[in-house]
């Protein structure tokens, strides 16, 4: 009997996915910022003024991408952490009343 045939398994580079400086979940956030800015600018341009629509599109894309990049600097798994000791009361008196005895 021959030994079973083995094949190498590629496990990737073990690094987060990155595209144009955005990493992980922030790639989707950046795409939403671009599409949202284009939609907002397009609707403004269609209903009000083409030049105002272009300004709104560029401004909103810039603001949203700035927000995405600032959130990325906090990290992929940023959570609020509370320092201190939280004490819960141990003696909680809960009284149940029977409606039949009222």
Image (cartoon, helix red, strand yellow):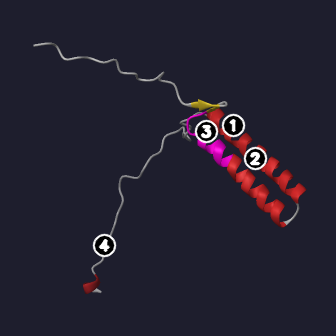
Start-end of magenta stretch: 23-33
Q: Eyeballing the image, is 65 above or below 14?
A: below
The residue depicted at 35 percent of the width and 63 percent of the height is 93
- In this rendering, the label closer to the viewer, 1 or 4: 1
How far is disc 3 from disc 1 in space, using C-alphas? 10 Å
> Outermost residue toward the top?
2
- Which comes sooner in the sequence, label 3 or label 2? 3
Q: What kind of secondary structure does the magenta stretch mostly adopt?
A: helix
Could you tell me residue 69's position as x and y percent? Answer: 69, 37
Closer to the N terminus: mark 3 or mark 1? 3
Instruction: Identify the disc placed on residue 61.
Output: 2
User: Which mark identifies residue 96?
Assistant: 4
Q: Is 25 a magenta residue?
A: yes
Q: Which residue is mark 1?
A: 69
Marks 1 and 4 in Cβ contact (< 8 Å): no
Question: Which mark is nearer the camera, 3 or 1?
Answer: 3
- For label 3, the residue is 27
The residues bearing labels 2 and 4 have C-alpha atoms spaced at a distance of 56 Å
Judged by depth in the image, the label closer to the viewer, 4 or 3, is: 3
């Amino acid at each position: 009997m021959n030994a079973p045939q083995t094949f190498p398994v590629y496990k990737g580079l073990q690094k987060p996915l990155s595209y144009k400086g955005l990493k992980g979940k922030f790639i989707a956030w950046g795409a939403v910022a671009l599409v949202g800015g284009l939609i907002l600018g397009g609707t403004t341009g269609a209903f009000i003024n083409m030049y105002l629509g272009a300004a709104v599109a560029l401004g909103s894309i810039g603001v949203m991408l700035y927000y995405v990049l600032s959130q990325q600097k906090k990290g992929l798994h940023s959570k609020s952490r509370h320092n201190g000791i939280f004490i819960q009361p141990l003696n909680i008196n809960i009284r149940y009343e029977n409606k039949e005895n009222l």
